[in-house]
Image (cartoon, rainbow, N blue to C red):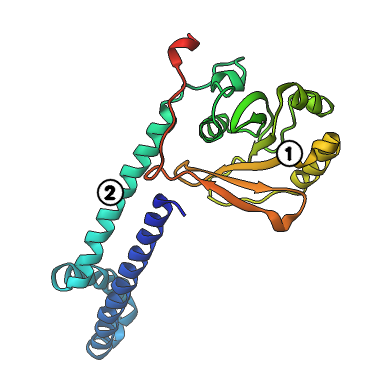
Amino acid sequence: MTTFERKQKELGDVVNARLLIFLLTACSFLAGSLVLLAIAAAKAFWIWIPILFVASLVAAHYALVNCSKYYQLLLRNESDLRDEIGRIRAKIQAVHDKYPKRRKGERFKDAYELVGTSIPEFEQRLGVGMYAEVKEVFVMAFCKAGRVVRVTAAIGSAFQCSPADNPSKWNGHIARLGCDELRQYHNHPVHTGHTKPSPPDYRGTVVFKNYLGINRNLLRSFIVYWNTAAEWKILQYDENPTQTKVVFEFDVELAELSPAVNSEQRH
């Protein structure tokens, strides 16, 4: 759970507590008013109910704001959390804004300068670039000693994607470049902070490993997805569903950010 998600949860808890107190107080006012009304004006009882309901809400708010220290504390906490969440959102947006958007016709791997980066830097650029596409993107990274030495990328549709090159040639690239790892990434364009591999994802891993043969153990498969504030997460999986796990969560409050793409060189 990232700092943003933790603050969102805290805000939800505070709001729920405040609303519960407010509704209980309003109901108490309303119940007392209805009893008095029933005694004083039985014939006009139903006409006065909507008026008393609104009056009870107003009275409850006034009483709690002015008389309840706990309710006042909840209001302050709610305001502070909303300010904090707004600050974090702005900070996350600044991370995305430092990368220029891919121009029409420009290759994804070139737009985000993926070749030659370290794996953490590579994944940060994927987190921003894939988010901007609003489609599934398939990226294959050929890695050596923790750095990305070759990349292929293909932009698919909103619901599917596939490799940009022929998987039967991957073994040749591994041998030529001396790769010690082959990392397959694609994204699920969801912003709920939760996802899981689909049946085609599992089948794809099996197919890719069959192509790789003796190099099948070099393959690592990942899904990139986001929370509601556009912080990205990376889920690792293979053909065995029990091996699925979140291996990375970008937390803007804790992150050491990599250098941005050099936009001047792209113009």
Q: Nearer the viewer, residue 20 or 50?
A: 20
Q: Nearer the viewer, residue 148 or 176?
A: 176
Label count reads 2
Q: Residue furthest bottom?
A: 39
Residue at left offset 27%, top offset 74%: 52
Q: Amino acid at mark 2?
A: Asp
Q: Amino acid at mark 1?
A: Leu
Residue at left offset 69%, top offset 41%: 220
Residue at left offset 62%, top offset 18%: 107
Q: At which x and y percent is residue 265?
A: 47, 10
Which badge, 2 or 1, is on the more N-terminal residue? Answer: 2
In which quadrant of the rendered view does residue 252 lie? top left
Q: Residue furthest top?
A: 267
Mark 1 sits on what residue?
A: 218
Mark 2 sits on what residue?
A: 83
The residue carrying pointer 1 sits among few (fewer than 14), some (14 to 19) or many (20 or more) residues within 10 Å by Cα, namely some
The answer to whether residue 48 is visible is no
Determine whether 151 is above or below 18 in the image: above
- Asked whether, in this view, residue 30 is left or right of residue 169, the answer is left
Q: Secondary structure at mark 2?
A: helix
- Asked if disc 2 and disc 1 are in contact, CB closer than 8 Å, the reply is no
The answer to whether residue 63 is visible is yes
Q: At which x and y percent is residue 244?
A: 67, 53
Q: At which x and y percent is residue 205?
A: 77, 42
- Residue 110 numbered tag: none
In which quadrant of the rendered view does residue 87 lie? top left
- Asked whether, in this view, residue 232 is left or right of residue 107, the answer is left
- Asked whether, in this view, residue 115 is left or right of residue 52, the answer is right
Q: At which x and y percent is residue 260?
A: 44, 24
- Asked whether, in this view, residue 253 is left or right of residue 120, the answer is left
